[in-house]
Amino acid sequence: MARRPLLGVDVQQGSQHRGGAYSPAVQSYGTILNEGTSSLRASPERYRRDSWLDRVPEEVAVDGGAGLDGRGDEGDEEDDEWDLAEYGYYSGSYQRKVAIYGLVPLTCIVSFLFFANLIRWVWPPRFPPPSSSTLPRSFPSPLPELLLSAAFFSLTHALRGPLYTAATVLFAPVWDTLAFNLAYVLLSQSLRLAALALLRVRHEMAYPLPTWRDGAFATAWWLALGWAVAEAATSVAQGYGQLALYRSVMVPVERVRAILEASRTGGSASTSANGSREYMPLSPRNEQASGSAEGAAEAQQANGGANGVAANAKSGRGTRRREPVSVEDAVKMAVDQDVEQLIHLQEREELEEVYGMPVIYIPVFVPCLQRIDSFLFSLGYTLVLAWAYLRSPLSFPPEYEPPGPPGMYSSHALLLAFPLVVLVHLGLSVLHSPPVLPRIGVHTTAYVGLLVGLGGFFAGLGLWGALS
């Protein structure tokens, strides 16, 4: 009973013989690309080293070592990386990646504590809140602001799926991304304004116009922090989920070459009649394999290193590697593993299409910087919108006449600020969309986001008079 492996390739991998001819590589259905070692996935260094063009006799004479470019070990490591990628695996330790990613939630906690204490240290309110506050004593500020803004963010995040589905149905493939981002931005910024109305910020203001000395400034500040905290928590959880997709395809660096050697030389002993190597240890074809015991053990060892058996044992999944009691159990367990790995393979490919690179290769400082950007974005958006809203007659009840001379309150600021905030937010959202993000890179978007976030943050502080 023959079953094609999920992530296996034929042992007769495309290798160059002494005569210069290549034997074609035949890959099975689970591989990333239908190309051999001479494909576009191959290293440019390999193309340069394998070619006799642009080489001088001195370089040929010393090319057994590092060559004139001095890149011997580095070039070999790069070649190993590309060879491993052709098998659908990545070098590195999954536990180390997860441990390093712990800097991201730590950055979120430090950012929240910094901004939470910044308003207490630098801009404390000059007057206490009025005695006729609508908030109960058992529910003091900033709890209502944090919980309300976090709830509104959860609502917008939950509606992302329906909004994207509606955009793909109503618009062409080129415009669906723009329509989805526009709908999401309008919803999120509208809910920021709705939070100010629900908390009755205008009714509890001690000053006629927005100023940092008023308690309304602190209310808008805590609303922004609550939104940012909810967004950071969601992003961190998604980051750990994306890393988990690479759990079973990461190979320790010190075992990369050993596994590649086992795949090239020892894999033929554990192949079946159709010529493809079996990567699934639970397959019933292992019992029918006619290879030697040494070759089978070597392939099994390579498979264990590639699939992270030690990591699975630590996470309580080691019981799935038990030997099947019958052929039917073996087939069922092997099919389940194939389906699970195929789903993870598809999810990894979708992520790589979005980011333009594997998630595990993104430096950890990039998501850390993105989390700082999210705090700056939220503070900037909320402060600008709150300032414009509290200067508008729309912030007063319909039956209430705004105090002060005529023309003191106008909606012109809100009519200018809201489209401007929507436009800036929409531009940043488009930068993080799949058509644009792979082209400019996650590093560029993080740097652009930092500049825009700092600009919006200080613009909001300036409108409230907090910089004077």
Image: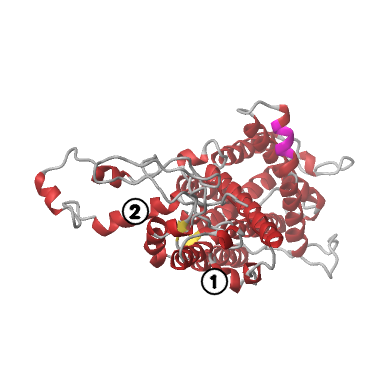
Q: Is 277 situated left or right of 231 in this image? A: left
User: x, y (%) of residue 200?
Assistant: 81, 52
Q: Is 395 situated left or right of 17 in this image? A: right
As helix, strand or loop, the secondary structure at mark 2 comes to: helix
Query: Which residue is nearer to you in this view: 197 or 50?
Result: 50
For image coordinates 62% across by 59% down, the residue present is: 284
Residue 404 numbered mark, or none: none
Whether residues under marks 1 and 2 lie with C-beta atoms below 8 angstroms apart, the answer is no
Asked whether the viewer can see residue 269, the reply is yes
- Measure how far apart labels 1 and 2 are at the Cα level: 26 Å
Residue 164 shown in magenta: yes
Query: Which residue is nearer to you in this view: 189 or 431?
Result: 431
Query: Which residue is nearer to you in this view: 287 or 370?
Result: 287
User: x, y (%) of residue 417?
Assistant: 64, 38
User: x, y (%) of residue 245?
Assistant: 58, 56
Label 2 neighbour load within 10 Å: few <14, some 14-19, many 20+: some
Q: Over which residues does the magenta segment extend? A: 163-168
As helix, strand or loop, the secondary structure at mark 1 comes to: helix
Label 1 neighbour load within 10 Å: few <14, some 14-19, many 20+: few
Residue topped by disc 2 = 78
Residue topped by disc 1 = 310
Residue 313 shown in magenta: no
